[in-house]
Amino acid sequence: MQVVKLSLKKANKIPIEADNVNPDNFAGKTKEEIEAILVWYGNGQCPLGDLFNVEVEGSDSVENTKIVIEGDVSRVKRIGQDMSAGEIEINGNVDMHCGSNMRGGKITINGDADSWLGCEMKGGEITLNGNAAYYVGSGYRGESCGMRGGKITVNGDVKDYLGEHMCGGEILVKGNAGLLPAISNNGGTITIEGSATMPASEMKSGTVIIKGETSDLLPSYKEDGTEEVDGITYRKFVGDVNAGGKGVLLIK
């Protein structure tokens, strides 16, 4: 097992683009080699060791590499981007694009996350033990597919556009969702245990389950009896018919 511990040397106002901070780039490297990895700081690059304290224990494969980030990194973007295996644990808040394009492995965030968490994710698992901002598990603007695989669990609330253009995978939100969750969905499953506003607009396929209060349900859904999931009976709606959709919307 290889464990790499990171902590900021000082709080940063200028954003750091840390797309190289993932187990794929750290596995098997020494402390000095990891400190030399370049990250973007504002409009220029600098070695990771100029910004972070780095500790390394052991040396192992990507699958057996864990990165532990201590403290607030709410101005550090793209942690875990493109990772294929291993584990990242963030003990604090994190900035945008965490886990973007993730293909495998696990990210645990013990804090809040900014927008675009797990965007266009293809595999792996993200667990957020706080609240998330906008576009969780969605696609970047202009893309036809957002999240394609894997699982995102948010143990708090999320803001608007949850799972926008989602094509596969699973999202579980244990709190409330903002406006237009599951907009333009093309697959996958979204479960919201709290409330949601105007869900599943323009959805073509996939499943959305809402256990709490649903407001502003679109009139372009056709009610189709009931369906039972995990012992709970839901009202079943099919649509969005305006988009020729055959998605399933289950409301408690």
Image (cartoon, grey):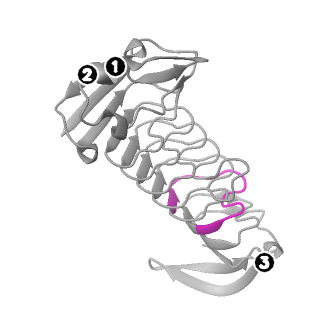
* Separation (CA) of disc 3 from disc 2: 55 Å
Q: Is residue 14 above or below residue 22?
A: above
Q: Amino acid at mark 1?
A: Glu
* Magenta stretch holds residue 95: no
What residue is disc 1 on?
35
In the image, the segment drawn in magenta is: 170-187
- The residue tagged 3 is 244
Nearer mark to the viewer, of 3 and 2: 2
Residue in the picture at 42% in, 48% down: 127
Lateral position of residue 52 relative to residue 77, left or right: left
Residue 183, above or below 73 = below
Task: Identify the amino acid type marked 3.
Answer: Gly
What secondary structure is marked by label 1?
A: helix
Q: Magenta residues: mostly which secondary structure?
A: loop
> x and y percent of residue 186 in the render?
65, 68
Task: Name which residue lies at 69% across and 86% down.
Answer: 224
Residue 226 appears in view: yes
Residue 202, given in percent of the width and then of the height, sits at 76, 66
